[in-house]
Image (cartoon, coloured by chain):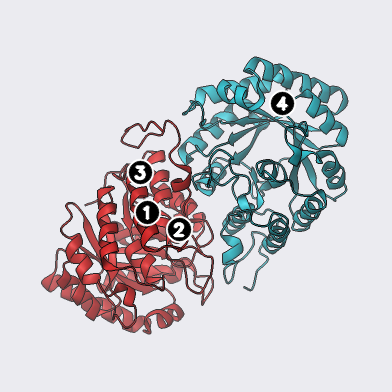
Chain colours: A red, B cyan
Amino acid sequence: MSPSPDTILVSEVGPRDGLQSIARTMPTPDKLRWIDALHAAGVREIEVGSFVPPALLPQMADARELVVHARSLPGLQVAALAPNLRGAQAAFEAGVHKLTIPVSVTEAHSLANVRKTHEQVFAELAAIAALKRDRYPHVELEAGLSVAFGCTLQGAVSDDETMRMVDRAAEAGADVIGLSDTSGYAEPRQVRRLFRKLQDAVGAKAGGAHFHNTRGQGLANVLAALDVGVTTFDASQGGIGGCPYAPGASGNIVTEDLVYLLEAMGFATGIDIEGLIAARGILQQALEGEPLYGMVPDAGLPKGFRYADAKAVHA
Amino acid sequence: MSPSPDTILVSEVGPRDGLQSIARTMPTPDKLRWIDALHAAGVREIEVGSFVPPALLPQMADARELVVHARSLPGLQVAALAPNLRGAQAAFEAGVHKLTIPVSVTEAHSLANVRKTHEQVFAELAAIAALKRDRYPHVELEAGLSVAFGCTLQGAVSDDETMRMVDRAAEAGADVIGLSDTSGYAEPRQVRRLFRKLQDAVGAKAGGAHFHNTRGQGLANVLAALDVGVTTFDASQGGIGGCPYAPGASGNIVTEDLVYLLEAMGFATGIDIEGLIAARGILQQALEGEPLYGMVPDAGLPKGFRYADAKAVHA
């Protein structure tokens, strides 16, 4: 499963992290068209939704339908998120290939986000891991460590705090442990340091980076993570999402700009940027008026641009 | 003059590179207020204007007045740009501390930008350097190598092409040679490679990085340059400028986000981010309706943020 050193997996989380942070609900047919277009552009992993009660997040009510459809797309790794055992069970049943369970590094964020103490969260994660081992052993179970670089409630987060949660997530049975900069606290030195510690602590279970671009630092943090061998990056088209409590702050790092960075540096993603821009058009249409971020869609590819696999573009 | 390894010089080029790319002219009193506010925020170098014929760039007609005023601000290094000997003479007479002469790495860009062949450009640079040595020896003369990483006209630019121009600029008498990514072609591996070559070729004459954020790669390129010891970075407030020929493409990297990156990483800039945001307000008011870029002004500083010099911010 691990990509060769010059290949990077870009995991598109817009349909989940992006859309769950936008008040209105994107109609299911639009989501399906968008997912199809992302797949056609060469995206090989998409987090299509979150298995949460529709009363809580009506934007995510069609998660099951999206998983079922996405599974029909050849070569696509279908990912979803679930905050608890009930959601995980529904995600497993729907047929996800990868399931992410969010685990807040700070207890303050955990209580605010899922109303659970760390004790409760890890008990739930252990139960999900047990269910997976029993009935869905082929599913990749990721613990996504939220606020791993800093927390809007607590402020600074020490490496030790994050690493304690890494150890507990590994003990609870996660297959992979990723680090999330939920609200844009990370800086490159910290990124290099923490991912090295993660790799030292859990080896092959070390997962990818989930950065937000809240303070414009997203791609600098990606470069820092690349430098220490991280090979999976979450991103959302148009950087949609943001934080409802921080007006003007964008969401995830922008897929379009990330893919450009990677390809320009010589890391093959398998993704066609013109195809991504076509997919962005669907998003733009379906969420008319919603701010989309990213510079590559406006600027276009530079004259003479070459993809990592040396496909020349005559721009 | 060279800063200690943990100190970085942020050179604010908005009043020149930013404003010269915007069609309307910012009134001189607004420019003066803006420059004062930047200085008050702790900015220690400002490129206040360009010494070009007012018929060509009416936005820059007040360059002399701005230099004279900026010289009155304590501790400020006053920089300007001039494309030829006549402009350089006017800049020297006005009292600049630092003068940048743009030198296009590709002849196509040189002909389009200043209507001169390389032969003519280096003859002009040599004449400027001679004038400087004779009458203004204390002024720092920088050759700013445009399109050093790629060119909208030519496409890809090889390291060898750039390095040939580095050698010629050094021979012509430049004190410092900086590399400019004029239209957002640079990627981090290239940045590391080229700045290392620059340092190997000219040693202490190796200058700073002037990145544009055309494709959103600006801060990743800054990180790459920091990794190889670059200590001077140009930036513009709000990322103003852009390219009149590439709608939607932003201008320089955004000062606010750059200073945040540097301070968060532990590089002291001497700049107060709240002060920068106050200065941005002046720009916003004076150029109402002009798009300003940057995420830090909207997101604010994170809770518990510490400047490199350990001044804690209780956000």
Q: Secondary structure at mark 4?
A: loop
Q: Chain of mark 2?
A: A
As drawn, B152 above or below B173? below
Say few, some or many: other residues with alpha carbon within 10 Å of mark 1 (under 14 / 14 to 19 / 20 or more): many
Residue at the location (45% across, 54% down)? A192
Quarter of the image for residue A14 reads bottom left
Q: Which three-letter amino acid code belongs to the residue tagged 3?
A: Glu
User: Do tags 4 and 3 sit on the same chain?
Assistant: no
Q: Chain of mark 1?
A: A
As drawn, A240 above or below B180? below
Q: Secondary structure at mark 3?
A: helix
For residue B174, the mark is: 4
The residue identified by callout 1 is A280
| Contact between labelled residues 1 and 2, with CB atoms less than 8 Å apart | yes
Say few, some or many: other residues with alpha carbon within 10 Å of mark 3 (under 14 / 14 to 19 / 20 or more): some
Q: Which three-letter amino acid code belongs to the residue tagged 4?
A: Ala
Earlier sequence position, callout 2 versus callout 1: 1
Where's residue A10, x and y in %?
33, 52
Residue A142 visible, this orientation: no
Residue at the location (44% across, 71% down)? A161
Q: Which three-letter amino acid code belongs to the residue tagged 1?
A: Arg
Q: Residue furthest left?
A: A135
The residue identified by callout 3 is A274
Q: Chain of mark 4?
A: B
Q: How far is the residue under mark 2 from the one under mark 1?
A: 9 Å
Q: Which three-letter amino acid code belongs to the residue tagged 2?
A: Leu
User: Do tags 4 and 1 sit on the same chain?
Assistant: no
| Contact between labelled residues 3 and 2, with CB atoms less than 8 Å apart | no
As drawn, B205 above or below A255? above
Quarter of the image for residue A138 reads bottom left
The residue identified by callout 2 is A292
User: Do tags 2 and 1 sit on the same chain?
Assistant: yes
